[in-house]
Image (cartoon, rainbow, N blue to C red):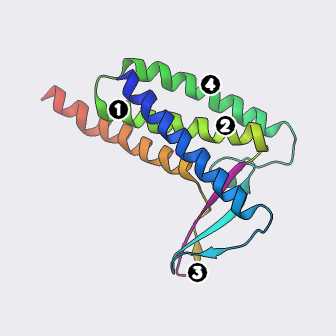
């Protein structure tokens, strides 16, 4: 299961960094909103905090504190991944690990996370996010599914 989780994490980190590289190449010199559909835009947003911009601070040391925290969590995830007993849990941990590492790379290189996916409906904009954020969401959903349903099937 360790190999599966690390493979998924590696693919997520690669996909996350390639998409962020593309967005920076396309939008850094000419920031703009690019409408893709009636409910989805591409934008360039620098997130200096965590989810939804929480804990954003202009302090120079904040990216390093957030990165350190993410690294500690990543170590915990790898330890958990080594003990994973099924593919659902291993995949979920791999998704979360890949997303965490992808965002740590941004914080170290740019002192902020590159967000660019902007969904909106009925006048409400969801905060912009990226591939790493999406993978963390998918990973947490898989971990919850495993905890709620996979373990129940073992005990029946």
Q: Earlier in the sequence, mark 4 or mark 2?
A: 4
Which region shows up in magenta?
Answer: 113-123
Q: Is residue 11 magenta?
A: no
Q: Nearer the viewer, mark 3 or mark 2?
A: 2
Q: Does the magenta portion include 117?
A: yes
Number of the label disc, if any, that sits on residue 104 = 2
- Mark 1 vs mark 2: give the one in front: 2
Residue under label 4: 72
| SS at badge 4 | helix
Q: CA distance from mark 1 to mark 2?
A: 22 Å
Judged left or right of residue 52, residue 56 is: right
Residues under numbered marks 1 and 4 in contact, where contact means CB atoms less than 8 Å apart: no
Q: Dot 1, how many residues are within 10 Å of its Cα: few (below 14), some (14-19), or many (20+)? A: many
> Tag 1's secondary structure?
helix
- In the rendered structure, the answer to whether residue 62 lies left or right of residue 47 reads right
Determine the residue positioned at 18% across, 27% down. Answer: 154
Residue 20: x %, y % from top left: 64, 52
Comes first in the chain, label 4 or label 3:
4
Question: From mark 3 to mark 1, how far is it between C-alphas?
Answer: 37 Å
> Is residue 126 toward the left or the right of residue 137 in the image?
right
Callout 3: SS = loop
Q: Nearer the viewer, mark 3 or mark 1?
A: 1
Of label 1 and label 2, which has the lower sequence position?
Answer: 1
Asked if disc 4 and disc 3 are in contact, CB closer than 8 Å, the reply is: no
Earlier-in-chain disc, 1 versus 4: 4
Question: Which is nearer the N-term, disc 3 or disc 1?
Answer: 1
Quadrant in which the C terminus appears: top left
The local crowd at label 3, few if under 14, some if 14 to 19, many if 20 or more residues have their Cα within 10 Å, is: few
| Residue found at x 36% / y 41% | 142
Residue 89 numbered tag: 1
**Label 3 – label 2 distance at C-alpha:** 32 Å
23 or 137, which is in the foreground? 23
């Amino acid at each position: 299961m360790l190999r599966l989780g690390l493979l998924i994490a590696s693919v997520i980190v690669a996909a996350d960094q390639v998409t962020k590289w593309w967005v920076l190449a396309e939008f850094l010199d000419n920031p703009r909103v690019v409408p893709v559909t009636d409910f989805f835009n591409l934008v360039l947003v620098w997130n200096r905090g965590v989810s939804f911009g929480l804990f954003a601070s202009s302090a120079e040391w904040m990216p390093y504190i957030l990165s350190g925290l993410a690294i500690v969590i990543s170590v915990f995830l790898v330890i958990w991944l080594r003990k994973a007993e099924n593919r659902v849990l291993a995949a979920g941990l791999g998704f979360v690990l890949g997303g965490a590492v992808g965002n740590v790379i941004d914080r170290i290189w740019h002192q902020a996370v590159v967000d660019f996916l902007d969904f909106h409906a009925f006048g409400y904009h969801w905060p912009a996010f990226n591939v790493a954020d999406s993978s963390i969401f998918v990973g947490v959903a898989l971990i919850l599914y495993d905890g709620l349903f996979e373990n129940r099937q073992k005990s029946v």
